[in-house]
Amino acid sequence: MATALITGATAGIGEAAARAFIDAGWHVIGTGRRADRLDALAAELGERFLPLVFDVRDEAARDAALDALPAPFSAIDLLINNAGLALGLEPAQQASLSNWKTMIDTNITALVSITHKLLPGLIERKGAIINLSSVAATYPYPGGNTYGATKSFVHQFSLNLRSDLIGTGVRVTSIEPGMVETEFTLVRSGSQDVSDKVYAGVNPMTGEDIAETMLWVATLPPHLNINKLELMPVNQAWSPFLVHREG
């Protein structure tokens, strides 16, 4: 029976992915900072779900938790790098440098760090890596500044991993969603009202939509690799262009 490690499993896409993979018969390790949410998920999903409470930016706490994994969770077949966040909606010239650094530390540094730690085992087991990027990696928008740049890194890091891992049997995929209604905009803006307005009338994707996509990617025949997969709700696109007219 295969085992997946999902970072950021306390809400949204990560939580939905934990349910989807458990339902499909996997063992799942779910990580996150909020112990109460992980405990509730463990009570719901049963003994095939293992909660690990740590901040992905805390390498010492992460290593202590991963080095003590019990059987059958110790042999990880799939790493889903889902943990990440966006902070702030301001243009670059008004943005918080602290927010920028937090996004870089979470979306980039923590992602590459846990990937590096788990790579030897993934190579040994001919496993897979699914990295959660975003359409913001490709299409810039006002206020996207550092968030979009971090997701662009995830996109390119995934492609470069594929190049390096040729011949190992390890598959790497960058999943790049558009509008998914989760806690994402609430965390970003700090306002439920702002979040509600962002998704109003859009019929956005759900965490479950992306989770099912991840499960599909993970269960393809081992000789197939999805390099990147971009998804949007039908009511979202990347144009019209933004134009400022003087005078």
Image (spheres, rainbow, N blue to C red):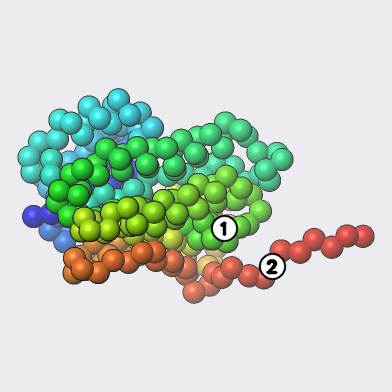
Viewer-nearest residue: 57 or 195: 57
Task: Using the image, determine if residue 41 lies above or below residue 171.
Answer: above
Nearest-to-viewer mark from 2 and 1: 2
Residue 136 image point, x, y percent:
53, 57
Secondary structure at numbered mark 1: helix
Rendering quarter of residue 10: top left
- Can residue 21 be spotted in the picture? no
Task: Using the image, determine if residue 75 lies above or below residue 165.
Answer: above
The 10 Å Cα crowd at callout 2, few under 14, some 14 to 19, many 20 or more, is few
Residue wearing tag 2:
241
Q: At 60% from the left edge and 50% from the top edge, which residue is drawn?
A: 144
Give the left or right position of residue 96, taking residue 236 as reference. right
- Can residue 232 be spotted in the picture? yes
Viewer-nearest residue: 152 or 162: 162
Residue 87 image point, x, y percent:
54, 41
Give the left or right position of residue 188, taking residue 94 as reference. left
Task: Using the image, determine if residue 53 lies above or below residue 152.
Answer: above
Viewer-nearest residue: 143 or 182: 143
The 10 Å Cα crowd at callout 1, few under 14, some 14 to 19, many 20 or more, is some
Residue 95 image point, x, y percent:
65, 38
Residue wearing tag 1:
198
> Residue pushed farthest right?
247
Secondary structure at numbered mark 2: loop
> Residue pushed farthest bottom?
234
Task: Using the image, determine if residue 101 lies above or below residue 168.
Answer: above
